[in-house]
Image (cartoon, grey):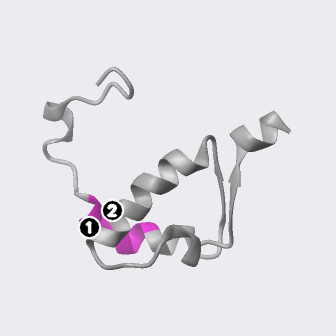
Amino acid sequence: MQVHGLTTEFLQDKPRFHEISKEFLNFINDAELIIHNAPFDVGFLNHELSLINLKTLDKYCAAITDTLKLAKE
């Protein structure tokens, strides 16, 4: 909760990743994702995708740009 402020009670009636994965993948299809500290988020998303036997995130989107990496350049 300290990281994102979301409580168990708040999340209780929200859909699980596997329930919205097709909608999510359609949304990002061929898009360039702009993510701060991308390896962190992509790691979590790839783990969730693997649990439902789907390919890694980079197979669905056109590119992943890490703004943290850009800031350090």
Counting from the top left corner in percent of width and height, residue 59 is at 56, 78
Residue with the mark numbered 2: 48
- What amino acid type is highlighted by mark number 2? Glu
Asked which secondary structure carries label 1, the reply is helix
- What amino acid type is highlighted by mark number 1? His
Residue found at the far top of this picture: 2
Residue with the mark numbered 1: 18
Residue that appears at 61% across and 41% down: 37
Whether residue 60 appears in this view of the structure is no
Residue found at the far right of this picture: 73
> Can you say whether 27 is above or below 44 in the image?
below
Quadrant location of residue 51?
Answer: bottom left
Whether residue 59 appears in this view of the structure is yes
Q: Quadrant of the N terminus?
A: top left
Contact check, label 2 and label 1, Cβ < 8 Å: yes
Q: Main secondary structure of the magenta part?
A: helix
Indicate left or right for 59 with 44 as reference: right
Reply yes or no: does residue 22 show up in magenta.
yes
The residue closer to the viewer here, 11 or 60, is 60
Which residues, given as a range, are shown in magenta?
17-24
Counting from the top left corner in percent of width and height, residue 6 is at 29, 30
Residue that appears at 34% across and 71% down: 50
Reply yes or no: does residue 63 show up in magenta.
no
Residue that appears at 63% across and 41% down: 36
| Eye-nearest disc, 2 or 1 | 2
Q: In which quarter of the image is the C terminus?
A: top right
> Can you say whether 41 is above or below 51 in the image?
above
Counting from the top left corner in percent of width and height, residue 60 is at 55, 76
